[in-house]
Amino acid sequence: MAGSLALVGSGEYLPEMLFLEAMLLDDARERGKKPMLVQVPTAAGLESKERLRYWEQLGQKQADRLGVESVFLPVFNRSDADNPQIARQIDDAALIYLSGGNPSHLAESLRDSLVGRRIFENWQEGSSIAGCSAGAMALCSKVVGFRLMTSEGVQGLGFVSNMQVLPHFDRYFRWVPELAIKKLVRDTKDATLVGIDELTALVKREGAQWQVFGSSLVHLLNHGSSTQYSHNEFVTF
C-alpha cells in the first residue's frame, strides 16, 4: 500500500509545518519505516553551496525538533541521481522530502533515474513522500509552465496524475492575469489545476481523500471561477 503523499505550497522544515511533517513521519512509522527524514535538495542543485548548506541546516533543525535522523541526500543533478550508493540511503525512510528550487531541474534530474525509482518504490512500500513548491510541482505528471504564457512545461515524476500544482498561490499566482490562468487551465486538459497557498498542504493518506492541512487555502481552478478549501476539509477531484 502506497504511503502518504503531501503537496506543500511552501514552508518545508519550518516550525509552522512541524505538525504536518510529524504526521507524515508517524504514518510511515506505523508501517514499520525508520524514524528518518531524507532531504532531497535536487531542485536547488543549480544554486550556490551556501544555499544548499542553508537547506541542509534547515532540515536538520526540523529533524531535531521531531526527534528523528536526518539524511541530506547529495543529489544535485542527473549524474548524482544515478549513483547507487546515494540511492541506497533512501530505503525504509519514514519521510522523503523533495524541497524547493527549480521544478524543471528537479523533474529532469530524477525522472527515470535510479534515485527517482527508489523514491517511488519506497513510497509504494509505505514511506511518506512530500514535495514543497518545486517539489510539489514535480511530483505531478506535468510541471506547469513556469513562464505561464510562453512555456509548455516539462514532464513530471508522475506520482500524481490528476492534477498540476501552482505553489505559493496566495503570494504569486493569485495576481496572475485571468487570461494566463485560463490558458493554464486549458493546457492541463485531463488534469485539475490546483493552487496551494503558502504554509498549506494538500495531503493524500491511506484510505482517505485528499485533505487540506495548514493555515491557508487550496484552490481548485477552472475556466470561470475557483473553489477554495481550508484546513481539515476534504477535496474531491
Image (cartoon, rainbow, N blue to C red):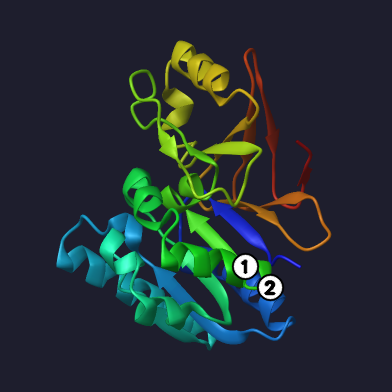
Which image quarter is the N terminus in?
bottom right
User: Mark 1: which amino acid?
Assistant: Trp
Report the label total.
2
Residue closer to the observer: 120 or 31: 120
Residue linked to disc 2: 126
Secondary structure beneath disc 2?
Answer: loop
167 horizontally vs 82: left or right:
right
219 horizontally vs 166: left or right:
right
Q: Is residue 66 above or below residue 107?
A: below
User: Residue, x 68% and y 83% (percent of image)?
Assistant: 29
Q: Where is residue 34 in the image (x, y as percent from the top left)?
A: 59, 87
Q: Position of residue 156 (x, y in %)?
A: 47, 44
Mark linked to residue 2:
none
Secondary structure beneath disc 1?
Answer: helix
77 horizontally vs 231: left or right:
left
User: Mark 2: which amino acid?
Assistant: Gly
Q: Where is residue 215 in the image (x, y as percent from the top left)?
A: 60, 51
Residue linked to disc 1: 123
